[in-house]
Amino acid sequence: GQQVMQIPQYQHVQEGEDFTTYCNSSTTLSNIQWYKQRPGGHPVFLIQLVKSGEVKKQKRLTFQFGEAKKNSSLHITATQTTDVGTYFCAGRSDTNAGKSTFGDGTTLTVKP
Amino acid sequence: DSGVTQTPKHLITATGQRVTLRCSPRSGDLSVYWYQQSLDQGLQFLIQYYNGEERAKGNILERFSAQQFPDLHSELNLSSLELGDSALYFCASSRQGNTDTQYFGPGTRLTVL
């Protein structure tokens, strides 16, 4: 079945440093979504990417969808303590009847 | 506030017991998803319903079952509970269920003693 892998599992950064998490799928995706879960909270939708090579920005966050639509990345510039949490990608494959598969997430901690 | 409600917020029970978790999706959303998240783990997809019908099934144990009612709320039934079933159970909803964004509820924290 479809597998979605995220790396790294954990990332510890100093406030102000950049952070990147990568998401790789075993199959071609029709779209990929990114979610953020704050400690003690629930996942919250951040963005959806649909087109090959698509790049979207939200303030300090940059999201990319690979040309082959099998990988994606989330990059945060100049991290702040409010960025702490777990970032999940969720990929939907055309062969998977509508179900999105979540990656295991990358947990980011930011040291002030 | 995502608009998805889940009850109860916390549930403490004993091994061997049966519990029911309830989820009300956002107004207008037809699809409901159930996920299990164990401590410091990712989101394990359990099952999806769309407009009352089962749409997709994940790694859901035979001891677990779910349904979606005509008013679109959903219930997840967990029976013969084991210690390892202790986890956060999230419900999410989406408009259609295919490419749509999923909106997550606050979760139900289940503790099995």
Image: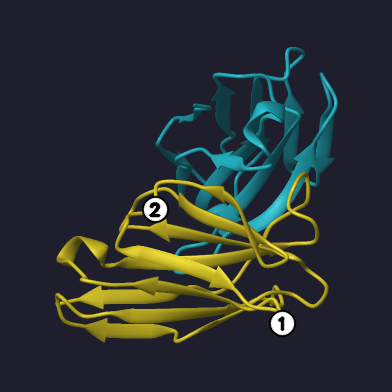
Chain colours: A cyan, B yellow
On the rendered structure, is A76 left or right of A103? Answer: right
Residue occupying the point 56% across, 37% down: A17
Mark 2 secondary-structure assignment: loop
Q: Position of residue B97 (x, y in %)?
A: 73, 53
Q: Is residue A52 visible?
A: yes
Q: Is residue A111 visible?
A: no
Query: Does residue B49 lie above or below A1 as drawn?
Result: below
Q: Position of residue B2 (x, y in %)?
A: 70, 73
Query: Does residue B86 lie above or below A61 as drawn?
Result: below
Q: Chain of mark 1?
A: B
Residue occupying the point 56% across, 23% down: A24
Residue occupying the point 67% across, 67% down: B52
Q: Chain of mark 2?
A: B
Q: Quadrant of the N terminus of chain B?
A: bottom right
Q: Position of residue B4 (x, y in %)?
A: 66, 76
Dot placed on the residue nearer the N-terminal end, 2 or 1: 2
Q: Position of residue A19 (x, y in %)?
A: 57, 35
Q: Nearer the viewer, residue A5 or A110?
A: A5
The residue singled out by tag 2 in the image is B60
Neighbours of disc 1 within 10 Å: few (<14), some (14-19), many (20+)? few
Query: Does residue B41 lie above or below A76 as drawn?
Result: below
Same chain for marks 2 and 1? yes
> Which amino acid, by three-letter code, is at mark 2?
Ile
> Which amino acid, by three-letter code, is at mark 1?
Asp
The residue singled out by tag 1 in the image is B71
Query: Does residue B71 lie above or below B77 as drawn?
Result: below
Q: Quadrant of the C terminus of chain B?
A: bottom left
Q: Nearer the viewer, residue A75 or B72?
A: B72
Mark 1 secondary-structure assignment: loop
